[in-house]
Amino acid sequence: MIKRIAILCACAAAAAPALAHGADRGEAKATVAGKVVSIDYGRPTLKGRDMLAQAEVGKPWRMGADAATTLKTDAALSFGPVTVPKGEYILTATRLDADKWQLNVLANTQERAKVVDIPLTAAKVKDSVEMFTIELTSEKEKGELSMAWGTTALKAAFTGK
């Protein structure tokens, strides 16, 4: 009997991760200046909510669900006068006012010290995006980061070195 209980407990423990409910993970990837740039993020769905409208002004938003959103870049990325050195980072976004956002690039360490803030351009999208989506597009040394959810897209252009 004890052996059966041990086997049942082992089976339940092995199945738990498969049964856990979490958001899908997404990856945005591009080659910029011949080097790989990628973002790994959670993809929550709106389910009738307007989540970006609920973001508090001045409070960082984790961007996605479950695990932190991460940026890995083999190239130094310049967003106008702001540069993100090659490396691995945590990304958050902060709403500065009704239609003004910034991307926060944090060190991928336990302290998560801020590396830089990048201004984002907000725009309305024609068709509502149900699942949070990050895209990276590129052409040679130039690229664009775009995040869309609901009827809002947040974007930043960059160059790679």
Image (cartoon, grey):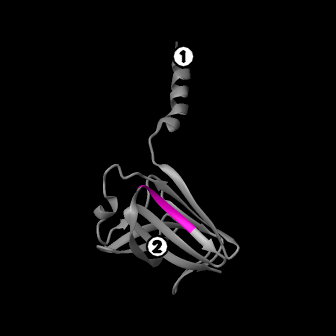
Is residue 16 or residue 4 the one in the foreground? Answer: 16
Outermost front residue: 126
Task: Please provide percent x and percent y for residue 10.
Answer: 55, 27
Give me the residue at 53% from left, 55% from top.
26
Residue 96 figure quarter? bottom left
Q: Which residue is mark 2?
A: 155
Name the residue type under label 2. Lys
Task: Please provide percent x and percent y for residue 140.
Answer: 67, 77
Outermost right residue: 34
Tell me how far mark 2 sits from mark 1, CA to CA. Answer: 56 Å
Q: Residues within 10 Å of mark 2 (few under 14, many from 20)?
A: many
Task: Please provide percent x and percent y for residue 105.
Answer: 49, 72
Q: Which residues are magenta?
A: 130-136
Q: Which of labels 2 and 1 is toward the front?
A: 2
Q: Which residue is mark 1?
A: 4
The quarter in which the C terminus is drawn is bottom right
Give me the residue at 43% from left, 63% from top.
148
In the figure, 8 relative to 49: above or below? above
Give the prevailing secondary structure in the magenta stretch: strand
In the figure, 142 relative to 88: above or below? below
